[in-house]
Image (cartoon, grey):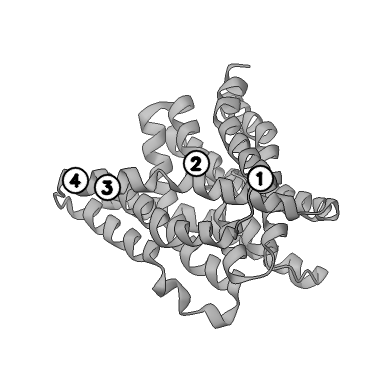
Amino acid sequence: MTYALRILEIVFPVVALCAVGFCWGFWRKMDPRILTDLVLFLLAPALVFDALARQNIDTRQLLQAVGISLAIHIIPGSIAWTISKIAGIRHRIFVPGILIMNAVSLPYPLALLAFGEEGLSQVVLLSIPNVFITFTVGIVIHGGRSMAKEPFRMPALWAAIAGLVVALTAIPLPKFLLRFTHLTGRGMFPIELLALGYRLRSIRISDLPFSLLVVGLRFSLGFATAWVISKSLDLEGPMRAALFLISCSPPAVLNYVFAERYSNEGPLAASVVFTGVLMSVVTIPLVLLYLELY
């Protein structure tokens, strides 16, 4: 019950901000792409750089985390791609909805609440490759082959590289710069959630079965992948917990942002992402219970 209440404290603000965006649409009309562009070109780069530059990263731990993180992306993503080919699924949100999970806004506070600072540090390590995968493979899948050069135009990718260099080399940075990136980056979550909520007005009931399919595969494949990796590598403690928390996370909100910018599937992507957030109220307590019992 305690964990369930903690998860509700984390998930409720997400749902509430989506609700505000949804209601805003009845009062004021706007183009949600304005907000998604703000996220992509200012807020996300600031958040990524700030999160990485503040870390004290050990190279050996980073290499292990990169290998594990690549596995929890590639295995579900490959299975999703295979399913899409066999079933003839043409929606571009299908594969990235399973491949790219929420690796920050849910796992970070959950790890801190449930496993302390050590758990949080392991989650941060595992989330680093997620940034690069999201802003490279994620963009190309959403936009198609014509977007192959688009990731190199994304400030967030270069911000991630710069932040990683700072973290690995311990380059001292002026406090005013870190305060700017910290303040600016914190604006990403409310803005992207408001845009998501606004777009929810365009979804259809008929989108629900597809959304449940994507989210169901995201959770089930994520859990199965984490279980196999943890058994194969005999992981224990905070690293094992971080593995399950990230691998079992719902589809990332950036999937909606990319769909809004690079395809015409913004409403469908909004349905997938929001369904994932709601289902996480049930799935995350189950994951935490599993970690406690086994």
Q: Which amino acid does label 4 sit on?
A: Phe
Q: Within 10 angstroms of label 1, few (less than 14), some, or many (20 or more) residues?
A: few
Question: Where does residue 89 sit, x and y in percent of width and height?
Answer: 78, 69
Pointer 3 residue = 180
Q: Which residue is pictured at 40% across the width and 53% down the height?
A: 43
**Badge nearest the viewer, 2 or 1:** 1
Q: How far apart are marks 3 and 2 (CA)?
A: 20 Å
From the image, state whether disc 1 or disc 4 is nearer to you.
1
What residue is pinned by disc 2?
105
Q: Residue furthest bottom?
A: 146
Residue 44: mark:
none
Residue at image position (27%, 60%) is 162
Hey, which residue is sitting farthest top in the picture? 1
Q: Is mark 1 on a helix, strand or loop?
A: helix
Q: Could you tell me if the residues under marks 3 and 1 are in contact, i.e. CB atoms within 8 Å?
A: no
Residue 257: x percent and y percent?
56, 59
The residue at which mark 1 appears reads as 27
State the separation of the CA atoms marked 2 and 1: 28 Å
- Please, what is the three-letter code of the amino acid marked with disc 1? Trp
Q: Quadrant location of the N terminus?
A: top right
Regarding residue 184, the answer to whether it shows in the image is yes
The residue positioned 59% from the left and 71% from the top of the image is 262
Q: What kind of element bears circle 2? A: loop
